[in-house]
Structures are given as structure tokens and as C-alpha cells.
Image: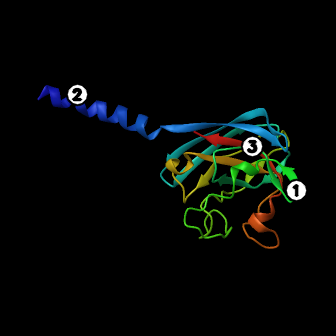
């Protein structure tokens, strides 16, 4: 009887530890020449409402920034229309269903569409980003990308929300 009683506290100790498992993604400035200086990390964990992303990044321009999970595990540059571009090796937004649509974090389009990342006047990201359609396992072998501008969660007037250039990136390993 006493042997069974010690199992009860063990369950309460182990369960929170398992739930707290996550991933820390190193984030870097990127430009057309490649990956630059480290800007911090983004911690990712599964929560009751989906994937929770907690940024601890700085050195970004103030304001709203498009924020997405991209399909490839690379932050390297690529070429578009004959010109080098930052972060193109990350590929397109993560879209396992092949929708080809950018409809925001709660729409039926790309699953890699995240809520905007808010950055304060101090250049630091604010708050936790909730991705209700993603789980931690979805990040494996993918890149997180921060864009220069905001995101209108549409393909109009510009494709993929109009966030513009890719300015920061990190690979989930």
C-alpha cells in the first residue's frame, strides 16, 4: 500500500515537466549577404490553445511585423528577379495542406501565418504570440521569419500580407 502512495506525488511532479518541454530558437538579423548578428531567442511550447511563442528579441524597428513559419530550415539568401534577397532560402509560408492562400492565423490558408509581432520603441518584441493551428512538432525543420512591415492577412493588394523584406530569421532544430 505504501509503495502506491509515493506514485501520486511523482505524477504531479513529472506531468508539469513534460508539459513544459519546448524549443528555443536562436534568431538572427538577415540581409542579402546572409545571416548576421544574433538578436535573441524565441521560446516555443505547446499550450492548451496551441503553440505559444515567447520572443526575447531586440534590435528590431518599432511597430508591427509580419511573422511566419516558413517551410525550409534555412535563413540563407536567395535570388528573385535576378537580385539577391534576404532569407529566401527559408521558402514560402508553411502550408502543408497546399492552400496557396494567406488568410492569417485563424483563417483556412497557410498554417504558418502567425499573428503580427509587436515591437516597442526600444526595439524589443512584446508579448506572447499564440498560434492556434500549430503545435510544437510543426516547427521541426522549419524557419521562423520576421518581416520588415506589418501583415494584412490577405493576398491583396500584395501577396502574403505585404510584410515586405525578411529582416530576421531562426531555424527550429
Quadrant in the rendering for residue 164: bottom right
| Mark closer to the chain start, 2 or 1 | 2
* Quadrant of the frame with the N terminus: top left
Few, some or many residues within 10 Å of mark 3 (<14, 14–19, 20+): some
Give the vertical position of 108 relative to 51 (above or below). below
How far apart are the two marked residues, 3 and 2, measured between alpha carbons? 52 Å
Query: Residue 70 vs residue 162: left or right?
Result: left
Q: What element carries label 1?
A: loop
Of labels 1 and 3, the one closer to you: 1
Query: Residue 151 vs residue 107: left or right?
Result: right
Residue designated by label 3: 76
Farthest residue, direction front: 82
Farthest residue, direction left: 1
Q: Could you tell me if residue 152 is visible in this image? A: no
Q: Where is residue 133 in the image (x, y as percent from the top left)?
A: 54, 60
Residue designated by label 1: 82
Give the residue drawn at x 81%, y 47%.
86
Query: Residue 11 vs residue 84: left or right?
Result: left
Could you tell me how many numbered marks the image carries?
3
Q: Is mark 2 on a helix, strand or loop?
A: loop
| Mark closer to the chain start, 3 or 2 | 2
Q: Position of residue 112 (x, y in %)?
A: 63, 58
Residue designated by label 2: 6
Give the residue drawn at x 82%, y 73%.
157
Of labels 3 and 2, the one closer to you: 3
Amino acid at each position: 500500500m505504501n509503495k502506491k502512495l509515493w506514485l501520486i506525488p511523482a505524477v504531479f511532479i513529472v506531468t508539469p515537466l513534460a508539459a513544459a518541454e519546448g524549443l528555443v530558437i536562436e534568431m538572427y538579423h538577415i540581409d542579402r549577404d546572409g545571416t548576421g548578428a544574433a538578436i535573441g531567442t524565441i521560446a516555443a511550447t505547446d499550450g492548451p490553445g496551441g503553440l505559444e511563442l515567447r520572443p526575447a528579441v531586440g534590435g528590431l524597428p518599432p511597430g508591427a511585423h509580419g511573422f511566419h513559419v516558413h517551410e525550409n530550415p534555412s535563413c540563407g539568401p536567395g535570388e528573385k528577379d535576378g537580385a539577391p534577397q534576404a532569407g529566401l532560402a527559408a521558402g514560402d509560408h508553411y502550408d502543408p495542406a497546399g492552400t496557396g492562400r494567406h488568410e492569417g492565423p485563424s483563417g483556412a490558408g497557410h498554417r504558418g501565418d502567425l499573428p503580427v509581432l509587436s515591437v516597442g520603441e526600444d526595439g524589443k518584441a512584446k508579448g506572447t504570440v499564440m498560434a492556434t493551428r500549430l503545435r510544437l512538432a510543426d516547427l521541426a525543420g522549419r524557419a521562423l521569419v520576421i518581416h520588415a512591415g506589418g501583415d494584412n492577412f490577405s493576398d491583396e493588394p500584395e501577396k502574403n500580407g505585404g510584410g515586405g523584406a525578411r529582416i530576421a530569421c531562426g531555424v527550429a532544430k
